[in-house]
Amino acid sequence: MTRHPYGGPWTQLKLSILRDYLNYFTKALRGKGFTLHYADAFAGTGHQSLRVVKGQDPMFPIEDLEGSAQIALSVDPPFHKYHFNDLANDHYTALNELVAKYPDRDCQVTKLDGNQFVGQFCRSLSSNDRAILFIDPYSTELYWDTLKHVANSQRIDLWLLFPISALLRMTPNDLDRLDESWVRKIDLLLGTSEWKDALYRPKPAPIIGDMFGEIEHPGMERLNVEEVAQFVKARLGEQFAYVAKPATLYANGRPLFLFMFAVSNRVKVAQALAEKVSTHILRKHQRG
């Protein structure tokens, strides 16, 4: 079996949330006349070989765990169709080996850039389809504009792992220290070139000016972590009918990812039900 050392203690929280929602989704929509799809844009190998990190609970399991693909394949009742994608050759091979163990599942495995996969998957859906799309990039591979395909489908519930740690690393507290080589990557990650205006504000002016009464402009400082997370949620809300308050995944007290849920369906009844269920699941696991 191809090992995939990735993630940490936060991975179990993410996958527990996902597992609960997948189980709800197929139970709620089976028998309603829809074709149900599960799609995983960065599926890995189907297993998680968690890395041991500093400060990790010594009782935390270090054996291989089910990854998102295997969790989805194990859902009962199952989805009608499964779509697994990963660009890495060894992951692609491992995914094919995994789906071979589930001959009763209708599975497709592809080896595409994640952004290309998402666009193709969204365009393939018809009015009778309903889907869950899980996007868990390894870092900043996902372009924000890719999410427009998901929102425009109006048939997909999205679970997205957003790399807030990478965004914070690329946007220093002091705007003057911004590395201009990161600007294009941030543009793609956030889907806008106007993020400086949104993420930075003037530093507080000094209480006392200099001896001549002149006050030098103090410069610009980045918003705090919670405010940056609110900005990302608001950006997603510009595209989707409903966006839940994200779960922040931490390591050693530092925020790594925002685990975000968004609904593309514009039907109010569908939105309300998805909001109720996702809120319950997110609260349940964050209390734990």
Image: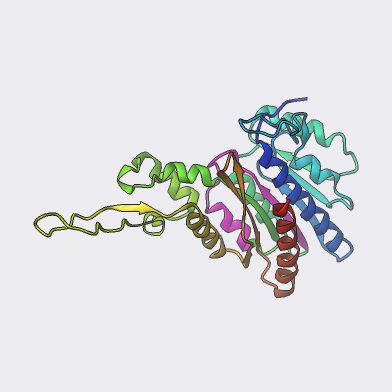
Residue 199, quarter of picture: bottom left
Tell me: 17 left or right of 104. Answer: left
**Residue at the extreme left of the image, as rendered:** 212
Which of 72 and 111 lies nearest the eye of the viewer?
A: 72
Q: Position of residue 68 (x, y in %)?
A: 74, 42
Q: How is the image coloured?
A: rainbow
In this view, 142 is above or below 51? below
Residue 158 lies, in percent from the top left, at: 67, 56
Q: Which residues are magenta?
A: 129-152
Q: Picture quarter containing residue 92?
A: top right
Describe residue 125's horizontal placement relative to residue 199 as left or right. Answer: right
| Relative side of 252 to 103, left or right | left
Quadrant that contains the N terminus: top right
Q: Nearer the viewer, residue 195 or 128?
A: 195
Residue 215 percent across, percent down from the top left: 17, 57
Q: Residue at x 69, y 49 (%)?
A: 134
Q: Is residue 197 above or below residue 107?
A: below
Task: Point out the residue furthest to the bottom here.
Answer: 268
**207 sits to left or right of 22:** left
Q: Establish if 195 lies above or below 141.
A: below
Q: Position of residue 262 (x, y in %)?
A: 64, 60
Judge by depth and name the residue closer to the eye, 207 or 176.
207
Marker count (numbered): 0
* Nearer to me, 257 or 252: 252
Q: Residue at x 63, y 31 (%)?
A: 53
Residue 212 included in the magenta stretch of the image: no
